[in-house]
Image: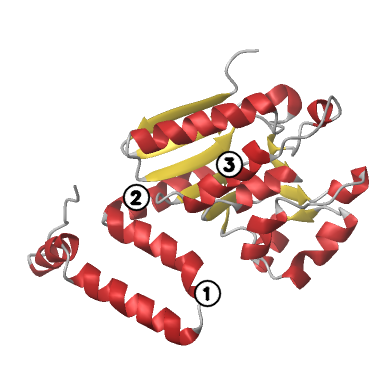
Amino acid sequence: MGQIVRTEVVDGIATITLDSQHNRNALSRQLLIELHEGLDLAEEQGARAIVLTHLGPAFCAGADLKERAEGPPDSRPMVHALERLMDTDRPTIAAVKGAVRAGGIGLMAACDLVVVETSTSFALTEVRIGVAAAIISVPILRRVPAGKIAAAMLTGEPFDAAEARSIGLVTHVSDDVDATVAQLCTGIRAGAPRAVAETKRLLGRVPTLPREDAFAAMRALSDELFQGPDAAKGMAAFAEKRTPVWD
C-alpha cells in the first residue's frame, strides 16, 4: 500500500491529510506511523499551526478492527499521537468534513480547535463491539463534562454536529470548513509565536490549579512576557499603527 497520510507546510501552516479511504481512515499501524511522521515534519519546519484533515466521506472510523483481531493490541502509538496533538506548542485544528466514529472522535478531540461540517455525524460505538472508549476518554473528558457525553458513550447512539457543539466537543460548525480553518490560521499567524504557545499551554494548565496557584503562575508569566522582546515589538507596532512582523 502506498502513502496514506500526506503532509505539506505552506505559509507556516502544516496540513496533515488522512487518505486511507479504503477503510474510512481507520487507525491502522501504518496510518499512525505516517501521522507521527507528519507531526515530525510540522515541528522540523517550524509550522505555526497544524491542521489535521482527511479525504473521503469519513474523517476517521476509529480502530482498525482487522488489525486488532490479528494479535495483541499495542495502543502506545495512538496514545502518543493524542499526546503530541495536545502537547505541541503549535495550535492544532481538526478540519472535519465527514463522519467520525469511536477512536476518530478521540483524534479530533485531542486538537485545540475542531471545525466540523454541518452535516457531520458522530458515534462512540465501542460498547457495541464489547470494549470501552478508554484511551480516547482522556482528551474527550478534558473537553466535555462527563454527564453531557455519558449517554453517547454508554449507548453508542449517533449524535449530530449541533449536539457536539452544544456539549463542547467541537468548537466550530461550518458550511465551509476550509474557509473557517483558513480564518483561524490567519488569526494564529497574527500572534507572536511564543505568545500563542503560552496561551495554548495556559488553557490546559490554569483550570487544573488552585486559584492562588493559578494567579501566582499567571502573574509571573504575564510579567515575563510584558518585559520580553515580542511585547516590545508588538506594542511599538500598535503605537505606530502598523502590523508587527514576528520572527
Inspect this view and state whether residue 117 appears: no
Three-letter code for the amino acid on which mark 2 is drawn: Thr
Provide the residue designation for mark 2: 186
The picture places residue 77, in percent across and down from the top left corner, at 63, 37
Q: Please, is residue 50 above or below residue 55 in the view?
A: below
The picture places residue 108, in percent across and down from the top left corner, at 62, 48
Provide the residue designation for mark 3: 81
Three-letter code for the amino acid on which mark 1 is drawn: Pro
Q: Closer to the observer: label 3 or label 2?
A: 3
Kind of element beneath mark 3: helix
Q: Farthest residue to the top: give it.
A: 1
Provide the residue designation for mark 1: 207
Kind of element beneath mark 1: helix
- First of labels 3, 2 by sequence position: 3
Q: Please, is residue 206 above or below residue 36 in the view?
A: below
Instruction: Give the residue at x 29% y 53%.
Output: 193
Label ID, residue 122: none
How far apart marks 2 and 1 lie (CA) works out to 27 Å
Is residue 186 or residue 105 the one in the foreground?
105
Q: In which quarter of the image is residue 208?
A: bottom right
How far apart marks 1 and 3 lie (CA) works out to 23 Å
Three-letter code for the amino acid on which mark 3 is drawn: Ala
> Is disc 2 in contact with disc 1, using a CB cutoff of under 8 Å?
no
Drawn side of residue 87 relative to residue 128, left or right: left
How far apart marks 3 and 2 lie (CA) works out to 25 Å
Instruction: Give the residue at x 42% y 29%.
Output: 8
> Is disc 1 in contact with disc 3, using a CB cutoff of under 8 Å?
no
